[in-house]
Amino acid sequence: MLSWALGFFVIAIIAAIFGFGGIASGAASIAQFLFWLFVILFVVSLVVGLVRRPRV
């Protein structure tokens, strides 16, 4: 998922260089959404992993 966010970020940068403001804005917002979704899922998986760890 982080690679998708990076891909959309690169698309946004390239579109901004060539002057396509609408496409750049859309790709940047998609990249930002995917990045935050990745961060949230990462934190949730860390918490679940700590809670479900077997007690020794």
Image (spheres, rainbow, N blue to C red):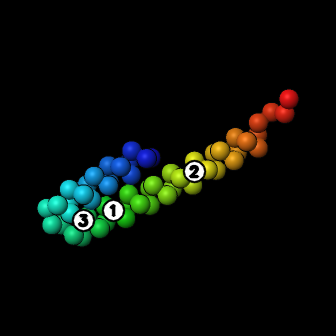
The residue that disc 3 covers is 23
Q: Taking 31 as reference, is 15 left or right?
A: left
Which of the two discs, 3 and 1, labels the residue nearer the N terminus?
3
Is label 1 in a helix, a strand or a loop? helix
Tell us which disc is closer to us: 3 or 1. 1
Q: Position of residue 47 (x, y in %)?
A: 69, 47
Asked if 51 appears above or below 55 in the picture, the reply is below
Q: CA distance from mark 3 to mark 1?
A: 8 Å
Which of the two discs, 2 and 1, labels the residue nearer the N terminus?
1
The three-letter code of the residue at mark 3 reads: Ile
If the image is split into quadrants, where does the C terminus sit?
Answer: top right
Q: List the single residue furthest toward the top.
A: 56
Q: Position of residue 23 (x, y in %)?
A: 24, 65
- Name the residue rendered at 64%, 50% in the picture: 44
Is label 2 in a helix, a strand or a loop? helix
Binning the other alpha carbons within 10 Å of mark 3 as few (below 14), some (14 to 19) or many (20 upward) gives: some
Please tell me the numbered disc located at residue 28.
Answer: 1
Q: Position of residue 9 (x, y in %)?
A: 32, 55
Q: CA distance from mark 3 to mark 2?
A: 27 Å
- Name the residue rendered at 25%, 64% in the picture: 24
Q: Position of residue 10 (x, y in %)?
A: 28, 52
Q: CA distance from mark 2 to mark 1?
A: 20 Å
- Name the residue rendered at 21%, 70% in the picture: 21
Which of the two discs, 3 and 2, labels the residue nearer the N terminus?
3
The residue that disc 2 covers is 41
The three-letter code of the residue at mark 1 reads: Ala
